[in-house]
Every structure is written in structure tokens, then in C-alpha cells.
Amino acid sequence: MDNATQQTHRILNLEEGINFRELGGYETASGKQVKYHKILRSAGLNKLTDNDLKFLSDYGLKTDVDFRSQSEIDKSPDRLPSGTKYISLPVFREDLTEASKIQESVIPEIDFDPRNGYEHMLGVYKEMITEDQSKKAYRNFFDELLGNSNDRDVLLFHCSAGKDRTGMGAVFFLYSLGIPLPTIKQDYLLTNQASKFYVADILKEVEKRDASLVESIRALMTVNENYLSVAEKAIKETSGSLANYIRNELHVSDNQVSDLQKIYLQ
């Protein structure tokens, strides 16, 4: 299976699930692979159908980590298979990414110049690295990852669009397993393929109402290498390296990294 096919293959086809992806199959520098049926990432779960719930139950879903704020959760609570453990770990007190507001309304009431989406997202990524609330959420995320140790039990983590808060969660997780950074960036950018039809539908509606907003809303609804670069720069300024950031800011010990690798690699 070539790389492009493998990337597409990891997008799961749910009836009402957006940006659902399997993280299995990624390779470490030493040739080990992330196990399949252990960890998923996604956008919101509030619109899942009964068939989607059966699919996730059959898939082995046991833990759902929700990175959204309380107001997002109240408006759009997750639908989950029975018996799934639900964990709320808000990365921000409010949804700074604005993704949830765009999902509610085509022309959202957002808290900044609506033509300024790209610059806004650069600021969001810096805050994800520097804010104590974000660090606490990602530290607790590692606790849940470490608790997912039973064979073929699946943990899913998500936010509203499954791209920014979820994207950084995936960066921290995959890096801890020893996945090379170019592969991690590929996974990060795969959101644009996994969500392309959903985003295209939103942008069509935006264009009908106010074409001047299209590029700004596109910036809010997609991922961009420059967003990740801002996070990398903030990590370097904070800790010198991603490994140091995970160890010193997220307080994940070398022993815990070793345990993660035992749980998730084969």
C-alpha cells in the first residue's frame, strides 16, 4: 500500500462522523508500528447515527476524551455507545478555534474581525502551547492514554472540528511514540482531505451570503503548516524541543513514555 493510499485508508467512513481517523499503522524510526484498533481521532460526536454508534461499539471504543469547552459540550453533547467512559478535558475555557460557532451558523458571530481568520488561528496555536489550561488538559490526556492498556480497547479523542486541539493532541501522542515529525505533519494535514466535502459545503453557503468572508472561514475550518510552525516556535521558546516540552511542561516522564510505547506499538 503506497503512502497516499494508506493515508486515505485511515479515514473512517461513518454516516454522520466528520474527520474520523485511525492512528494505527504509523511507523517509528526503529520500524515499529502504532497498533490498529487502539486509538482514533475525530471531530464532534453529537450527530452520530445509531449505525455509527454500533460501528464504534464493534470497533472497540471504550474511552472518549473530549477537548471541547463546557459551553460546546452543553450545546452539542457527545453521542456514545453504551459502556463508553467519557472524559472532559477542556483545552480552552471557550472555543477559541471558533469551529463550533461555524458549525452552528454559516456566518458565525465570532469574537474578532471575521476577515481575520488566518491571523486568529496563529494566535490560537500559540495559546495552546503556552496556556496553563491547555497544558493541564494535555497532561491529563496522557493519563488516559496510559490507562488504555487492555488489548483492543480503543480510545478516541476529539474536539469540534477534530483539527486544532485534537491536532496538537495527536502531535504530542505520536511524538512520544517515536513517530518522525514529517509523518506527524502528514497526519496533521490529513484533516484537509478528511473534511474537504464538509468544508466545501460550508464555504458554498458562505459565498452565497458574503463572498468576502470565504478565505477567512476557510482558514478557520482547515489546517495549515504555518499553524503548526507557530506551535513549534512556541515550544522551542518554552522548552528548547518538543521532547523537553512533553517532559517538563506536560510532566510526562521517560518511564511513562516507555509505557505508552508498550501499549500502542507493535
Image: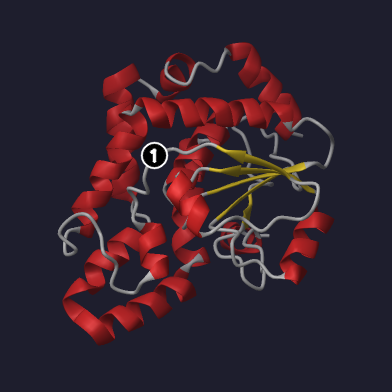
Asked whether residue 185 appears in the rendered view, the answer is no
Within 10 Å of disc 1 (Cα), the crowding (few <14, some 14-19, many 20+) is many
Q: Is residue 216 left or right of residue 204?
A: left
Query: How are the residues colored?
Result: secondary structure
Instruction: Please state which amino acid type lies under the numbered disc 1.
Output: Phe
Residue 59 location, x and y as percent? 80, 55
Quadrant position of residue 109 = bottom left
Quadrant position of residue 4 = bottom right
Quadrant position of residue 35 = top right
Query: Which quarter of the image is occupied by the C terminus?
Result: top right
Asked whether residue 87 appears in the rendered view, the answer is yes
Q: Is residue 251 left or right of residue 83?
A: left
Q: Which residue is mark 1?
A: 92
The foreground one among 259 and 45 is 45
Residue 91, relative to residue 114: is it above or below?
above
Q: Of helix, strand and loop, which one carries label 1?
A: loop
Query: Which quarter of the image is occupied by the N terminus?
Result: bottom right
Q: Is residue 197 left or right of residue 12?
A: left
Residue 76, relative to residue 153: is it above or below?
below
Residue 74 location, x and y as percent? 51, 53
Residue 67 location, x and y as percent? 50, 43
